[in-house]
Amino acid sequence: MSMERGSFAARHDFDALPLSPDVDVCCAQFSQIAALSDMAHRLVPGVQIGASDLARYFTFDPQSILTFSRKGNLVGGMAFLFLNDRGHDALLLDDLCLTAPDTRHLASAGEEVSAIYIWAIAATGRGIAGLGKAAAHLRQQRFRSADCYAQPSTSAGRDIMKATGFRPVPSFQPDLWCYERPWNRTPMRMPGSIIQARSFVDARH
């Protein structure tokens, strides 16, 4: 999966998106997996993963799939790959199978999350307003230090990334975009300061 459908006019840093009172965002329930899979197939071009495979990743990490609901109706969802160090390197080197990722690249409950790959956003109508609460979900201690990555599969998805602070990054993975968390950003250079050049291998740190 990649990114979504919907309009997104306002420009906000991803971690500064407003928390819409109209859309409820929470971790998915197992009973919702089939509906979320169907929504992804309808809204996200190129989706190959089926409900049974999605359920397997959900079982591995129930925090990796969110639902967006409005007035009790499902209006969207968002799925993540929480990558460990091996998965982060594999993503940048184009060694990560994004259609069927190996769980050895995913962070277990006791492992640090090195990077967050936004696997899919699928939303209808006002459901896209749930992004603010999804960003808040990613500010939990477990995910807070991890930058976010994504690949747009639609023009709307690309517009969302541009509007929320994502930027294309050098990598062997084609068309990879990154959102650097505000607290991970290098402070602006002060006069007389020395910035040491880092290698590509060090770039993710």
Image (spheres, helix red, strand yellow):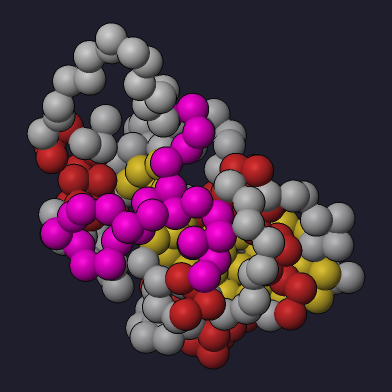
Residue drawn 29% across the image and 41% down it: 84
Furthest residue toward bottom: 42
Q: Quadrant of the N terminus?
A: bottom left
Outermost residue toward the top in this view: 192
Residue 110 appears at what percent x and percent y? Answer: 39, 31
Task: Judge whether residue 50 can be spotted in this image.
Answer: no
Q: Is residue 141 visible?
A: yes
- Residue 176 horizontal side relative to residue 56, left or right: left
Percent coordinates x, y for residue 22 in the rendering: 86, 62
In the rendering, at what x and y percent does residue 81 appear? 39, 55
Relative to residue 46, is residue 105 depicted above or below? above
Q: Is residue 60 magenta?
A: no
Residue at image point 50% right, 33% down? 182
* Nearest the eye: 121 or 171: 171
Indicate whether residue 167 is drawn in magenta: yes
Q: Is residue 2 above or below residue 198?
A: below
Q: Horizontal placement of 161 versus 204: left or right?
A: right
Outermost residue on the front side: it is: 191
Which residue does the image show at 47% across and 37% down from the upper left?
A: 181
Quadrant of residue 130 in the image? Answer: bottom right
Where does the C terminus fall, quadrant-wise? top left
Is 103 displayed left or right of 28 in the figure? left
**Closest to the observer, 24 or 5:** 5
Q: Measured from the top left, where is residue 145 in percent x and y? A: 44, 31
Instruction: Tally the numbered discs.
Output: 0
Q: What residue range appears in magenta?
A: 159-184
